[in-house]
Image (spheres, helix red, strand yellow):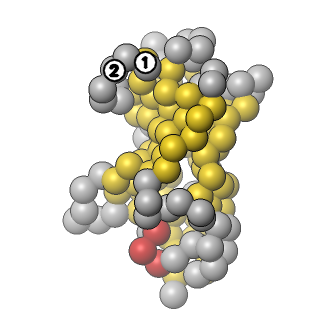
């Protein structure tokens, strides 16, 4: 089974940086795409970024382009989201997710990690 565990969230001030990690296990992810999403209270889940485990090719939502960077370390089987210039509107629970390349939706999800950005 695929297991994803996020970490690295916390409470920071406006303008700060955080690096989220997602430890992936249970499978070889050669043919997988990995994504980051977030959900704020009362709002829909929002796509942030995705990367191909083997080929890279990062892709970002316009809302985070230029501030957030997705990457992965295949040797450590870990996905990352580097977040810079954080704003209060970035406050949300952040999730990592995984899918086989041919799938439309992400069937595998982590438990989430809370990011809170104070004014």
Q: Image point 42% across, 24% down: which residue?
A: 99
The answer to whether 62 is drawn above or below residue 118 in the figure is above
Q: Position of residue 36 (x, y in %)?
A: 48, 45
Q: Residue furthest bottom?
A: 119
Q: Image point 66% across, 41% down: which residue?
A: 71
- The answer to whether marks 2 and 1 mark residues whose Cβ atoms lie closer than 8 Å is yes
Q: Position of residue 33 (x, y in %)?
A: 49, 27
Q: Separation of disc 2 and disc 1 at Cα? A: 6 Å
Q: Is residue 4 visible?
A: no
Per the image, label 2 sits on a secondary structure element best described as: loop
Location of residue 57 (image quadrant):
top right
Q: Position of residue 54 (x, y in %)?
A: 63, 21
Residue topped by disc 1: 100
The answer to whether 44 is drawn above or below residue 85 in the figure is above
Q: Position of residue 66 (x, y in %)?
A: 59, 63
Q: Image point 35% across, 29% down: which residue?
A: 106
Tell whether 72 sits left or right of 48: right
Residue topped by disc 2: 103
Location of residue 44 (image quadrant):
bottom left
- For label 2, the crowd category at 10 Å Cα-Cα, with few meaning under 14, some 14 to 19 and many 20 or more, is few
Tell whether 26 sits left or right of 93: right
Tell whether 74 sits left or right of 13: right
Q: How many marks?
A: 2
Q: Image point 43% across, 18% down: which residue?
A: 100
Q: Is residue 76 visible?
A: yes
Choose between 67 and 43: the one closer to the eye: 67
Label ID, residue 8:
none
- For label 1, the crowd category at 10 Å Cα-Cα, with few meaning under 14, some 14 to 19 and many 20 or more, is some
Tell whether 10 sits left or right of 93: right
Location of residue 12 (image quadrant):
bottom right
Per the image, label 1 sits on a secondary structure element best described as: strand
């Amino acid at each position: 089974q695929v297991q994803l565990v996020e970490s690295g969230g916390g409470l920071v001030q406006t303008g700060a940086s955080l690096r989220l990690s997602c430890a992936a296990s249970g499978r070889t992810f050669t043919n997988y795409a990995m994504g980051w999403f977030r959900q704020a209270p009362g709002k829909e889940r929002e796509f942030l970024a995705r990367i191909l485990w083997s080929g890279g090719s990062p892709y970002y939502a316009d809302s985070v382009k230029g501030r957030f960077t997705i990457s992965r370390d295949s040797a450590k089987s870990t996905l990352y989201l580097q977040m810079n210039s954080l704003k209060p509107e970035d406050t949300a629970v952040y999730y990592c997710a995984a899918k086989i390349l041919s799938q439309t939706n992400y069937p595998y999800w982590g438990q989430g990690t809370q990011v809170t950005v104070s004014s």
